[in-house]
Image: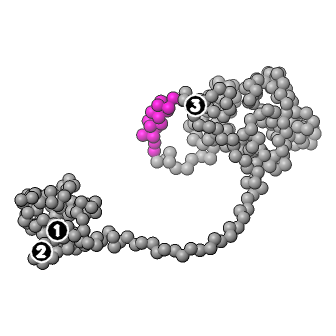
Amino acid sequence: MNDPRAVCALTLPPRDGAPAYRWLCAGLRSAILEGRLRPGTRLPATRDLARAYGLSRGTIVAAFEHMKAEGYVTGRLGSGTYVNTVLPDTLLDVAAAPRAPRAALPQPARRWSDAGKRVRGFPSSTSGPARAFRANQPALDLFPTTLWAQIASRCLRRASANLLRGGDALGYAPLRKAVADYLGRSRGVRCVPEQVAIVSGVQEALDLIGRLVLDPGDRVCMENPGYIGAALVFNALGARVYGVPLDEQGMVMPGARGRDARLAYVTPAHQFPIGVSMSLARRLAPSPVLQVRLRSQDGGRR
C-alpha cells in the first residue's frame, strides 16, 4: 500500500502547541496553494491518514470538515474527498476590468518660480576610485567604513525615542557643542554652539547662507577661477556674481565694481582650484565690502 503521506505530498509545519486538526489543515492548505495537490486530486481516506500521522480518525474528519467549510476541498458521497476545482483564493482575486483607451489630454505647462527657472544641476561626477587632478571626487576608498559602521551601530543600540523626534533646526546640540569646541582649539575661532549649524554638505550650507543674506539682484564677489557649486547657488538665488582675479597672495581685493557687493565668497586656506593660500597681510587687510556696508548702516560715521 502506498504511504498516504507520500500520496498527499504534505509538508506539515511545526506543531507549536496548535490543535492537531489545525496543524493538519495548515499542511493541507499549503500543499493546495503551492500546487503539490492539484485541483481534482483525491485525498487519502481518513483512516489511512490517521494511521500514517498517528492521529485519531476524529481529528482527520474535523480537519476535512474545516477545509470543506473554507472551500478548499469537497466531499463526494461514496467516492471520497477531493481538492476543489475552484479555490477560494481564486474567487477573492478580482480581475481589473479592461479600461477603454482614452484620448491623451493636453497637459498644462508647468509654472516654475523665478528661482526654479534659475536652478542648474551640479555637474555629475563619475563613480569609481578617485583619480588625480579630478575635482569633486573624494577619496572614498580611504574612508574607514568598517570603523564608521561599528561606531554607528553602537550609537544606534543606545538610541532613545527622543533621538527620533524632530530636533533643533540648527542640528544635534551635542554635536554643535563638539564642533564649537574643536574650532576653538584647532582654528582659534571664538564661537558658541548657537553659532553652529549642522548641514548635509557644502551645497546646503551655501544655500542656507545665501537665503539669509542675499536678495535677488545683490552682487556677490567670487574668486575667478572658483568653486562652480557656489556660483550655481548664488545664481539660482538671483544674485549677480562678480569674478575677482587671483594673484600669488590669493584673491585680489575687489575693485570699484565689487564695492557694492553684499557677499564675498573666499577660500583663503587653500584656494579652489588653484591651491594658493591667501597671505596673512591680505587676510588682515580691511575689507572694502565690509567698510561700505558699515558706512551705509551708520550714516557715514565710520
Tag 1's secondary structure? loop
Tag 3's secondary structure? loop
Pick the residue in front: 255 or 113: 113
Pick the residue in front: 83 or 174: 83
211 shown above or below 64? above
Tag 2's secondary structure? loop
Left or right of 252 in this view: 100:
left
The colour scheme used to paint the residues is one colour
Pick the residue in front: 45 or 267: 45
Q: Position of residue 150 (x, y in %)?
A: 45, 33
Q: Are marks 3 and 1 in contact (CB under 8 Å)?
A: no
Pick the residue in front: 71 or 268: 71
63 shown above or below 284? below
The residue that mark 3 highlights is 129
Judge whether residue 147 is colored magenta.
yes
Q: Are marks 2 and 1 in contact (CB under 8 Å)?
A: yes
The residue that mark 1 highlights is 42
Q: Residue drawn 71% across and 62% down?
A: 110
* Labelled disc at residue 79: 2
Who comes first in sequence, dot 2 or dot 1? 1
Alpha carbon of mark 2 to alpha carbon of mark 1: how far?
Answer: 9 Å
70 shown above or below 158? below
Left or right of 195 in this view: 6:
left
Q: Residue drawn 59% across and 74% down?
A: 102
Give the magenta part as a residue range.
Answer: 143-160
